[in-house]
Amino acid sequence: MNFKNFKRIASLGLALALVAIPTGCGNKNKQDQGAGKDAGEKQIVWKLSDIVTEDHNWNLGAKDFAKRVEEKTGGKLKIDIYPNSELGSEMEALNGILSGTVDMTISAESMSNWAPLADLMAAPYAYKNEEHIQKVLSSDVGDKIKNQIEDSGFKPLMYQLRTPRNLTSNKPISTPEEARGLKLRLSNTPLAIKCWEAVGANVNVMALNEVFTALNQGVIDSQENPYDMIYNSSFYEVQKYANETEHVVGYLFFIVGEKQFNALPEEMQKQVLEAASESQEYINKLYFDTKDDFKQKLIEKGMTINENVDKDAFRKAMEPAIKEYFDADSYKIYEEVVELGKDL
């Protein structure tokens, strides 16, 4: 699907996901030093922590959003961006949002530690493609996911599509049997851990900024990420193969703390949401303009792409873990997600 077609499909979803988000004011926190009489005199500064490199698409999207926010608020709200895990891991950023030491981050299934339905943003083999994701975002199912995330203290502002996650290694891996015994790095996401343990991998949980060194030193011998992350993290230097398991097609949210957002004056809240709505189009266009580039870049760096992967076998190996992981109500919602892509 190209960006023009996706843009037409996405227009309704954007209206539902972003414009309709309520903008009522809540309790003021320490960031809102300038609310009320002095609102025009003091600048509010938000810290946005992300785990990707400065030139990664997520970070470029964050820069675009920060620029629009500063312009719309006349400089009254400034967003400082800290890429490459400068302020810590994704989990540390999420904890920081709740404690008030960080204000924004980019996250998905890691939020499941607070909002279990966030696992549905990256459940293995749940989504077929970008159109499927957009159907979910525009549906009651998407609302359930967003609402639970908001109830946990994180406010989604806009979403980021992700290219499929693939397994890297130093030998070709085409079947679950060949993945057994792999020392595989994963982030601290319980569903992914359960699924890969069901395949037979030996899971090691670690932050992204530790992975290159761990691969280089043999602490682990495999990891899984989208091609853009594999390229920007230079994993091609320490991994020979990218095996196209495509086990996760998903999306992330740019999130801000509910307390931090509600502490803004009402007019500024509206300006933030307007900036998010405008940045959403930039982020989607950037994704579609570059999504096919990184596979070729990895080939040029000497990585071998193993396209001969039995994805159906991996899906079947993970299915029991998915069913066991979710409670009955959440599993029904998972089935709704899958059903929305049935005819795509």
Image (cartoon, rainbow, N blue to C red):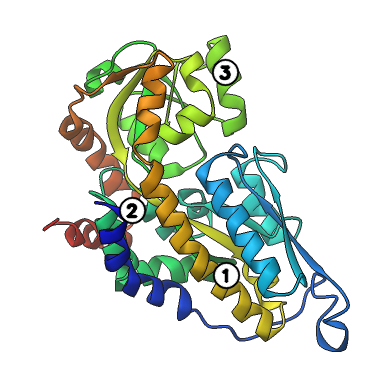
Front-most of residues 128 and 219 = 128
Instruction: Choose mark 1 or mark 3, whichever is in front.
Output: 1
Label 1 sits on what residue type?
Answer: Ala
Q: CA distance from mark 1 to mark 2?
A: 35 Å
Q: Residues within 10 Å of mark 3 (few under 14, many from 20)?
A: some
Asked whether, in this view, residue 225 is left or right of residue 75, the answer is left
Q: Is residue 226 visible?
A: no
Residue at the spot x=82%, y=87% of the render? 36
In what element is the residue under mark 3? helix
Which disc, if any, is residue 214? 3
Asked whether, in this view, residue 209 is left or right of residue 151, the answer is right
Residue 185 lies, with reference to residue 286, above or below; the image says above
The residue labelled by disc 1 is 275
Which disc, if any, is residue 10? none
Q: Position of residue 228 (x, y in %)?
A: 44, 35
In what element is the residue under mark 2? loop
Instruction: Choose mark 1 or mark 2, whichever is in front.
Output: 1
Q: Label 3 near label 2: C-beta < 8 Å?
A: no
Front-most of residues 86 and 78 = 78
Q: CA distance from mark 1 to mark 3?
A: 39 Å
Q: Label 2 near label 1: C-beta < 8 Å?
A: no
Q: Position of residue 232 (x, y in %)?
A: 52, 30
In what element is the residue under mark 1? helix
The residue labelled by disc 2 is 326
Q: Which residue lies most toward the left here? A: 343
The number of discs equals 3
Label 3 sits on what residue type?
Answer: Ala
Q: Position of residue 9 (x, y in %)?
A: 27, 66
Q: Residues within 10 Å of mark 2 (few under 14, many from 20)?
A: some
Residue 281 lies, with reference to residue 320, above or below; the image says below
Q: Position of residue 162 (x, y in %)?
A: 40, 46
